[in-house]
Amino acid sequence: MELLQVSGAAYYDSLLGRRPQNPPQDFTRILYIPRHNSATVHLPLYDVAEQYRNAVKGCVLNSSQYAVQLSMMEKPRDDGMNCEVAYHVNLDRSATDDAPVRLQVQQRSLFEDGAAIAHALTRLPPHDGCLIAIGNGQKETDTYCTLMEASFPIQPSIRGKYSIPHPYFTFLLPGKNNNQRIVQWQVRPKEDSLRRYTLVEIGAASERPDGALSEDNVREPKILAIYHHIGINVWLPKDFSEGVLLLPDQAGSEDNERELLIIASLLALLGQLREQAQMKPQKLKAAHSRNSQNMFQKAISVIHRH
């Protein structure tokens, strides 16, 4: 199944201003995040490196062809014979609407009692922020804690009848020699499409400016992780999440803890996109919607001529 010919897909990407590119060479770890919503209570994350490579072989990240091929990737079977569980995620939300959303991420291990556990605690509006911590499951103490804050440094995108906001999520990750690093989950709608979030390192915590950094202020930031939605949706769905998380190969225990924090931050991010009204697509007024739709139809007609 192909929605577009390869040449047509490439031309479509160029019309939209996208810049398809391969991920960093050391991004060999691929985690599959199964389809889930805010009612999910348990979520296994799978190592799907082989299935991912088979699905997107010959495709370039961010391209339309990549999105189509990724949507056909072989999924984990119920018997667990075709891929292994890498992490267990437990999600908990109290019955009241204003209660915080809690999630817990733990690496699958034979010795789970002493394994590191990452927690994320998200408070819904009017309260802001998400607290992310990592600790020892046996000692029940946190060894690191950081606050992830959302901001809106770029203008919303217009797609058909909807305005899609683009929240960025900024927090701190532990670095070498106790040197904390500023990191940020960013969405770049023009270059990368609306289906991807990229975690980038901005700089040292001591260099943190007032407010969030915009795209214009960031020069070739180091990429730490890439999340891509599975499906050919125009933007990230507001009622469920499903995707793959691309990560660099791990080298030691410090990398394991960083990876736990990254996973917890991503799942908290996806939860906020589904739950918070200010982060959901908003329907436009009729006049604005007609103008946007006419422009989209013109672009499609140009593609068909090619």
Image (spheres, rainbow, N blue to C red):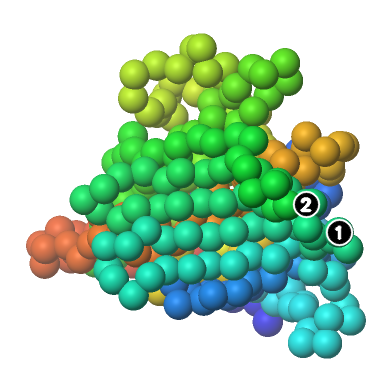
Which quadrant holds the N terminus? bottom right
How far is disc 1 from disc 2 in space, using C-alphas? Answer: 7 Å
| Residue beneath disc 2 | 115
Front residue of 67/270: it is 270
Q: Are marks 1 and 2 in contact (CB under 8 Å)?
A: yes
Q: Establish if 281 lies above or below 130.
A: below
Position of residue 271 relative to residue 214, above or below, is below
How busy is the neighbourhood of tag 1: few (under 14 within 10 Å), some, or many (20 plus)? few
Tell me the residue at 69%/71% (across/down).
Answer: 44
Would you identify the image quadrant in which residue 80 lies?
bottom right
In this view, 286 is above or below 206? below
**Residue matched to label 1:** 111
The reply to whether residue 194 is visible in this rendering is yes
Residue 89: x and y in percent read 63, 65
Mark 2: secondary structure = loop
Q: Quadrant of residue 21?
A: top right
Circle 2: residue type: Ala
